[in-house]
Amino acid sequence: MYRTRYNGTLTLADEGKQVKLVGWVSKKRNLGSLLFIDLRDRSGIVQVTVKTDELTVPEIRNEFVISVKGIVNKKEVANPNLKTGEVEISVTAIEVINKAKNPPIIIADTTDALEDTRLKYRYLDLRRSVMQEKLVIRAKIARAAREYLDHNEFLEIETPILTKSTPGGARDYLVPSRLHPGSFYALPQSPQIYKQLLMIGGLERYYQIARCFRDEDLRADRQPDFTQIDIETSFLEYDEFLSMMEVLIQKMFKDVINYEVKLPLKRLSYAEAMETYGSDKPDTRFDLKLHNLDFLHHGVELFAHTPVVRAIVIPEAGDKMSRKQLDELNIEAKKFGVNSLANLKLTSEGLAGSLATKLNDAQKAQIIKSLNLKVNDLVLIAFNEVKDRVLPLLGALRATLAKRFELIKPNQYEILWVEKFPLFSYDKETKRYASEHHPFTMPLIEDLELLKTDPSKVLSQTFDIVINGYEAGGGSMRIYDQELQHRIFALLGMSEAEIREKFGFFIDALEYGTPPHGGIAFGLDRLAMILSGTDNIRDVIAFPKNLSGISLMSEEPNSVTQEQLDELHIKIIKGEDNE
RNA sequence: GGAUCAGUGGUGUAGCGGUUAACAUGUCUCCCUGUCACGGAGAAGAUCGAGGGUUCGAUCCCCUUCUGGUCCGCCA
């Protein structure tokens, strides 16, 4: 037997007990004939004390795996920084199980190594307790989900990883078929069609902790393969389903971080979210709402060509931003297609700032009243012909400014549903409608008539769960009527032949008594980020890829042998790997 | 595809035309019986990401390139 106890669990209650421990040498302090070793395993660290004049001690260095036998003793002076700080192990036998090279990074809670170094030596980085804690949180979220869903008669069912490529949406990762040269499997972007087929198959309640793949560019919160808690149900009405999912969210927060989520969750329509927060995933931990100043379009020269004039008010920030800092915000504005921002601040002498000289007294008074300004408030004003530029810009600004002015309290969680997204977006280039969510999304019943007259106005039975400004999940009620499904495909500009080619089996399936159904997918990675308080998705994935989609540790993707390519009937025509 | 920031001992940083390339930490050797960020003495360790240019002289300025971070496009 390697061990009788876990290091981090030892307390004063164990005083006098004989224990056998294993672990890694986290730190040693050699005082000559007295040697202290911080011995680390997954549970934590305990100090072991070796009298080197009474015991022959093998060579011991950092990160060696060692085994000790000894007695749990009370320490003269406790170390309050350690869970086990009240005890130490007086060693009677010590043995090296395995040696270790000097690690390239410091293995401690605070390491000074940069992330790319840590990623290269991920297996060492994972020894740090702060990293392990994040994976513990991730596992606890999955466990909470399984417990809740199992308890509510959901079945955990696996769906294929080698699936059919269906164009539209994200790029697929393709897998060449050896048995069928020239044909490809696609890795699933989500198990969407399969889970709907499971509903048609009469399984009624399904879930899966599903790996999904999207061949798109990465971000701090986006990986090419990621995990969703994927859920689908039959015979639940919209509100019933959302309520059931709210309780799941509540349980996750309770089980993982012991935080009480108050139900029911707030709901905001997509349109309200955009108008009020400039985002479809608003961070509602702080205010900074958007204000409508469209009335300035008439009467202010600067806004003569821009009917959309919107503002955010940052309280007590009038003296906190220099002219230079305000100018820098214009860089942000340009990203959103807005040329520049105007600003105002209310001083004791009245309105000042870039816009002040362009306003008459009546307009100034109207602004002060309309925005309810107080002295030293800062107003940032975005203006453009198009709402779709102004609102997202101010949405982005409110997020960055909230961070800059520290308007966000730590350990605060604001959870809400954003619902009723438009069913379609209109692509001006191709002059076609595209599904905002996916083509199986149910429109709002009251908007069905609009499908004939103005499809762009049709809203859908969709919902996103938004937590602290992150989209932590999204779903919809699905179309179960094949007639309606055909109308949607037609609106998307798909011919019968195209429909047959892409979704034929699914269209067929719809005709055999499809139950009303709907579902959601929660982003497990995102949830883990939120609950472990990191804004880096790589922190909550054991072996993540960097922004170029490369694993710095195992160095995939890599080239393969000519034999492998030949077998797959694949010829590389461009690139260095061609030989 | 685009924008932007950063590459200097193992690790993290400083230096920004002429330096013996500095500091911290880690590593190694010796001393130390109460340390817990142990302490003390000493040592080793860097072709300043790569290539080119400007210059009497480049870690420093310019160009190219590679690598990494962040963002935009993209992500039904």
Image (cartoon, coloured by chain):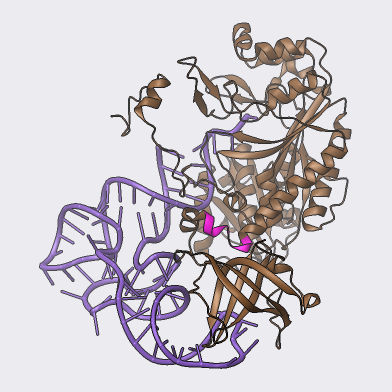
Chain colours: A brown, B purple
Asked if residue A576 lies left or right of residue A259, the reply is left
Res A52 visible: yes
Which one is nearer the viewer's eye here, A160 or A226?
A160
- Magenta includes A236? no
User: Which quadrant of the figure contains the C terminus of chain A?
Assistant: top left
Instruction: Quarter of the image for the N terminus of chain A: give it.
Output: bottom right
Q: Confirm whether residue A307 shows in the render.
A: no
When the figure is inspected, residue A54 is found, relative to residue A547, above or below; the finding is below
Q: Is residue A200 above or below residue A39?
A: above
Compare residues A348 and A106 and report the one nearer the observer. A106
Q: Residue at x 52, y 59 (%)?
A: A124
- Dividing the picture into quadrants, the one containing residue A431 is top right
Say which residue appears at 63% left-offset and 9% top-offset: A500
Q: Residue A529's x, y, as percent? A: 66, 52
x, y percent for residue A425: 64, 26
Q: Which residues are magenta?
A: A123-130
